[in-house]
Amino acid sequence: MNSVKNEIYFEFDAVSENESLARVVIAAFLTRLDPTVEQVEDVKTAVSEAVTNAIIHGYKEKGGKVVMQASISGGGVLEVHICDTGVGIADIKQAMQPLFTTDADRERSGMGFSFMESFMDKVSVESKLGEGTKVHMWKVFDDCAAETQPLLQAAVWNSDGRL
């Protein structure tokens, strides 16, 4: 069977209320991989942290747009990219250190990137001052569907269970 790559592109306002929307969208998108509840929660948490970073640190809560791009490819690999055109990160290596925060006055924990790295298989960050930040995350669902299938085919059931 040929693998089908499925992609989404979702742009939304950089307001805190939309962080939960991003979580729901990514959870719905990855259901075709038949993930466990724990796997869904892991991805939702990582996406939530990336979106929150964009809103709070990238845009300083002054508005803008956040883009979430995601794809599922053969072999059950989920790619998620969270992008903003905010202020950017001066030192990515430092920003990714546990407990580092640029917003200590507002009691930020500095654990956003650490959570992303804990819940996803791979995380990388690109950023330019004054141009914004792109967070790239990958998670392999090797114990889920081996290949993505067209939605209609994935919904077919037989007497032995799901095809």
Image (cartoon, grey):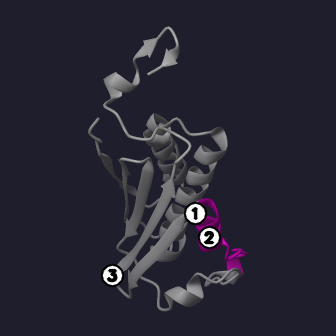
Quick one: label 1 or label 2, which is nearer the N terminus?
A: 1
Task: Determine if the magenta segment contains residue 9.
Answer: no
On residue 131, the disc is: 3
Q: Which class describes the residues within 10 Å of circle 3: few (<14), some (14-19), or many (20+)?
A: few
Secondary structure at badge 1 equals helix
Stretch of the chain drawn in magenta: 105-119
Look at the image and tell me whether residue 44 can be seen: yes
Residue at 37 percent of width and 78 percent of height? 132
Left or right side of 145 for 152: left
Residue 35 picture quarter: top right
Q: CA distance from mark 1 to mark 2?
A: 5 Å
Residue underneath mark 1: 49
Between 116 and 51, the one lying in front of the other is: 116
Q: CA distance from mark 3 to mark 1?
A: 20 Å
Q: Amino acid at mark 1?
A: Glu
Residue 67 picture quarter: bottom left
Main SS category, magenta section: helix
Q: Which class describes the residues within 10 Å of circle 1: few (<14), some (14-19), or many (20+)?
A: many
Pointers 3 and 1 in contact (CB under 8 A)? no
Look at the image and tell me whether residue 61 can be seen: no
Pointers 1 and 2 in contact (CB under 8 A)? yes
